[in-house]
Amino acid sequence: MTNTFLATTAMILSIVVTATAGDILTASAMRQVGDLDLIRQRSGIFGAATAVVTNGRFGLGVICLALSFFSLLFAFSHRDLSLIGPAATSLTFVTNALAAKFFLRENVDHRRWTAAIFVCIGVALLAF
Amino acid sequence: MTFRRYLVLAVITLTASCGDTFLSRGMKSLGPVSLAHPGQLIHAIFSPWVAAGIVLLIGFFASYLTALSWADLTYVLPASSLGYVIMTLLAKLWLGERVSPMRWLGVVFITAGVGFVTRGPSYTDHSAATTHPIREEELETAELEPSELEPSGEVRQ
């Protein structure tokens, strides 16, 4: 394996891992906070915003998403957009489905797996 | 799922795709940014297209969080992935990029994936599964999934 291949793999993995962690943490935070429509009706838009930004998991999630964004920018500065973009996005779809099943205990049934795989293939094809 | 919630998914799809397209349009007009001069990225934020893109992406994040408060992550992500299709159309029609037949095939796959996921339940209701085991059995006979139940026993819209 060449150093270029390893470096590209490391760049894509760093984007995928931080994006998945960010998505899972923010989704978990929103599950803790509850239905924002109901909170807004009860406490107004500022009450809803406060409920979100004071959640610890939301803060961690935003940090992970920021790391993912900067990993993406770093990868774009070294590799082609048509390689990094689809590879990172489509892999994140699959890792999100796995992580949502194990960490969020979401009901990832055959329909959602099919959708994740179809979107994954579709995003990969966009690279051509 | 109510009409209003489908509207939130539509807003996620549109703001994400238009936001990214605006960023791309803005950065193309500014030219390549050198790693030796990262300050150019700060300057880019204040250009009209990039600023408009950031505003749209803030709208995307707000509507994305709203959707995650009442739907599963594994529902929201594929359901809003139609944005890749819109982005491809905008790249072709507005930015004048060439879209190959393989990319159009990718668009077909994504659209099919969205179709699969949006026909299913949007939320895994853990409380319904643990506090109403009898209703789960009743559900099986009614060919409904547990995630379509509210804690009260009502079926989610």
Image (cartoon, coloured by chain):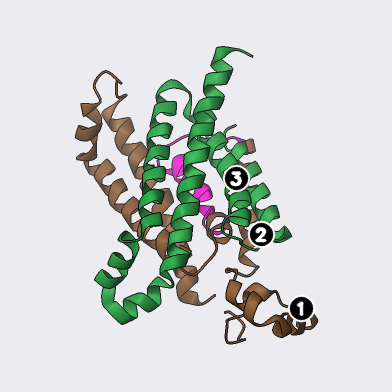
Q: Circles 3 and 2: CB distance less than 8 Å?
A: no
**Rendered view: B153 above or below B44:** below
Residues rendered magenta in the picture: B78-101
Q: Residue at x 39, y 38 (%)?
A: A67
Is residue A112 left or right of A34 when viewed as pictured?
right
Amino acid identity at mark 1: Glu
Drawing shade for chain B: brown
At label 2, the amino acid type is Val
Tell which subunit mark 2 falls on: A
Distance from Cα at disc 1 to Cα at disc 2: 17 Å
Query: Which mark is on residue B143?
Result: 1
Given contact means CB atoms under 8 Å apart, are the residues at marks 1 and 2 in contact?
no
Local crowd size for mark 2, using a 10 Å CA cut-off: few (<14), some (14–19), many (≥20): many
The one of B126 and B116 positioned closer to us in this rendering: B126
| Relative depth, front residue between A60 and B41 | A60
Vertical comparison of A122 with B138: above or below: above
Q: Where residue A104 sits: x, y (%)?
A: 56, 59
**Residue at 44% from the left image edge and 66% from the top image edge:** A32
Sequence order check: which comes first, mark 3 or mark 2? 3
Chain ID, mark 3: A
- Of circles 3 and 1, the one toward us is 3
Residue occupying image coordinates x 44% and y 55%: A26
Residue B57 on image: x %, y % = 35, 51
